Image: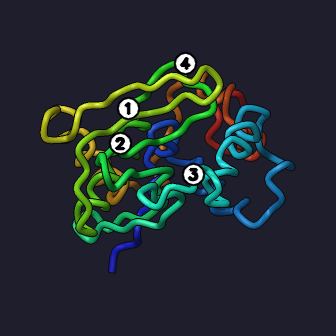
């Protein structure tokens, strides 16, 4: 049986596939020992979602676990408005929308649809500057949907023994770099 992929791993895998290994390894440790300041700020920004205190409206699902059997992928959504069909992924501060962000939103979309919800709109919300960024639904962006499906396949077929880092900037910005034997900074 193939392992379930966590939605959060999609962006991590694009950044560096080895980071998932370290994420699992450090998973039970106190996060303050290894998280960067921006990661800690992001975790704090999600507290209202995690505590389900973001909204009292009954139509707003918040911090709900989702699963897609089609992709064997699981995770949590930030918010989904069952009345409007708007799925929102909140980020502390969006400077750029990375493909990995979009793929996480696609995974949430597919899981919710499979669970019987009608998702009509996808968006990101940047908390610090209170801005929303609309994202096309997968069926309206076949190129990104194909890339999403390709990423799932790539994760399933990944062999860490064969991996070699190629981007020194990613290594410089990786919180796991001091522990990594594949870092380009060694």
Q: Where is mark 3, residue-wise? A: 55
Mark nearer the viewer, 2 or 3: 3
Assign the N terminus to one quadrant of the image. Answer: bottom left
Residue 38, x across and y down, in percent:
72, 32
Dot 3 falls on a residue whose secondary structure is loop
**Residue extending furthest toward the bottom:** 1
Residue nearest the viewer, comparing 57 with 28: 57
Residue 110, x across and y down, in percent:
26, 56
Crowd band around label 4 with a 10 angstrom C-alpha radius: few (<14), some (14–19), many (20+):
few
Residue nearest the viewer, comparing 26 with 186: 26
Residue 20, x across and y down, in percent:
56, 53
Give the residue displayed 47% in from the left and 67% down from the top.
65
Crowd band around label 2 with a 10 angstrom C-alpha radius: few (<14), some (14–19), many (20+):
many
Work out whether mark 3 precedes mark 4 in sequence or the reverse, and give the earlier one: 3
In the displayed structure, does residue 127 sit left or right of residue 37?
left
Residue 44, x across and y down, in percent:
74, 44
Q: Where is mark 4, residue-wise? A: 95
Q: Are marks 2 and 1 in contact (CB under 8 Å)?
A: yes
- 3D distance between C-alphas at marks 2 and 1: 6 Å
Q: Quadrant of residue 41?
A: top right
- 3D distance between C-alphas at marks 1 and 4: 13 Å
Work out whether mark 2 precedes mark 3 in sequence or the reverse, and give the earlier one: 3
In the displayed structure, does residue 10 sit left or right of residue 30?
left
- 3D distance between C-alphas at marks 3 and 1: 28 Å
Q: Where is mark 1, residue-wise? A: 99
Give the residue displayed 51% in from the left and 36% down from the top.
15
């Amino acid at each position: 049986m193939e392992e379930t992929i966590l939605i959060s791993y999609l962006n991590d895998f694009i950044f560096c596939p080895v980071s998932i290994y370290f994420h699992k390894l450090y998973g039970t440790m106190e996060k303050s020992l290894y998280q960067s300041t921006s990661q800690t700020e992001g975790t704090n920004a999600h507290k209202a979602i995690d505590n389900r205190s973001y909204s009292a409206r009954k139509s707003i699902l918040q911090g709900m676990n989702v699963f897609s059997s089609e992709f064997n992928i699981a995770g949590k959504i930030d918010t989904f408005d069952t009345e409007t069909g708007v799925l929102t992924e909140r980020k502390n501060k969006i400077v750029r929308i990375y493909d990995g962000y979009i793929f996480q939103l696609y995974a949430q979309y597919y899981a919710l649809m499979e669970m019987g919800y009608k998702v009509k709109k996808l968006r990101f919300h940047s908390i610090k500057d209170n801005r929303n960024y609309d994202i096309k639904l997968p069926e309206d962006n076949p190129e990104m949907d194909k890339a999403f499906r390709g990423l799932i396949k790539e994760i399933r077929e990944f062999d860490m023994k064969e991996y070699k880092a190629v981007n020194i900037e990613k290594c410089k910005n990786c919180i796991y770099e001091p522990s990594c034997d594949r870092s380009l900074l060694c």
